[in-house]
C-alpha cells in the first residue's frame, strides 16, 4: 500500500517573508519558490492572500481548523442542551395529577 505524503505546514512569518522576497526583494517568484522548496503557485496564493489583507495575522488563516473546532464544540453543547430540554419536556411521576381533582396532588 502506498503511504500518503504528509503536507508541510508553514507559519505566517515564513509566508510573509517569502512574499516580501518577491515584492520588495525584486526576485522572480519562480526563483524564490524553488529556493524555498515550494511551488510558484503556492507562493502566488500567499501573495494574493497578503495583498487582500495586508497583515499576515489576517491573511494566513489556514484551512479553518480553528473554526472547525469551535463549530464542533458548539454542536456538542447544543446536543447537551437539547437533551436537557427533552428531559424537562417529559412528564414526571411527581407532576402527575388526577383529572378529576386539578388542585390536589397525590
Image (spheres, helix red, strand yellow):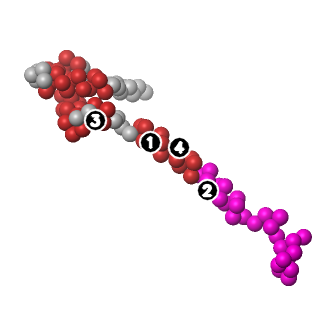
Of mark 2 and mark 3, the one earlier in the sequence is 3
Q: Which residue is mark 3?
A: 59
Q: Looking at the rendered structure, which numbered label has been put on residue 46?
A: none
Front tag of 1 and 3: 3
Q: Is residue 94 magenta?
A: yes
Give the residue at x 69% y 64%. Answer: 89
Marks 1 and 3 sit apart, C-alpha to C-alpha, by: 18 Å
| Picture quadrant where residue 101 is located | bottom right
Of mark 1 and mark 3, the one earlier in the sequence is 3
Residue stretch in magenta: 79-106
Q: Residue furthest front?
A: 103
Image position, residue 25 (x, y; %):
12, 20
Of mark 4 and mark 2, the one earlier in the sequence is 4
**Residue 20 vs residue 30, the one in the foreground:** 20
Image position, residue 3 (x, y; %):
41, 25
Q: Looking at the rendered structure, which numbered label has been put on residue 82?
A: 2
Marks 2 and 3 sit apart, C-alpha to C-alpha, by: 37 Å
Q: Which residue is mark 4?
A: 73
Judge the density around disc 1: few (<14), some (14-19), many (≥20) Cα neighbours within 10 Å. Answer: few
Judge the density around disc 2: few (<14), some (14-19), many (≥20) Cα neighbours within 10 Å. Answer: few
Give the residue at x 83% y 73%. Answer: 97
Amino acid at each position: 500500500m502506498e503511504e500518503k505524503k504528509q503536507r508541510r505546514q508553514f507559519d505566517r512569518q515564513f509566508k510573509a517573508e517569502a512574499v516580501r522576497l518577491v515584492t520588495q526583494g525584486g526576485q522572480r517568484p519562480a526563483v524564490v519558490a524553488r529556493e524555498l522548496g515550494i511551488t510558484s503557485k503556492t507562493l502566488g496564493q500567499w501573495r494574493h492572500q497578503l495583498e487582500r489583507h495586508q497583515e499576515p495575522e489576517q491573511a494566513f488563516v489556514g484551512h479553518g481548523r480553528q473554526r472547525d473546532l469551535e463549530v464542533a464544540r458548539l454542536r456538542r453543547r447544543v446536543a447537551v442542551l437539547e437533551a436537557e430540554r427533552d428531559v424537562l419536556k417529559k412528564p414526571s411521576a411527581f407532576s402527575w395529577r388526577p383529572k378529576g381533582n386539578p388542585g390536589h396532588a397525590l
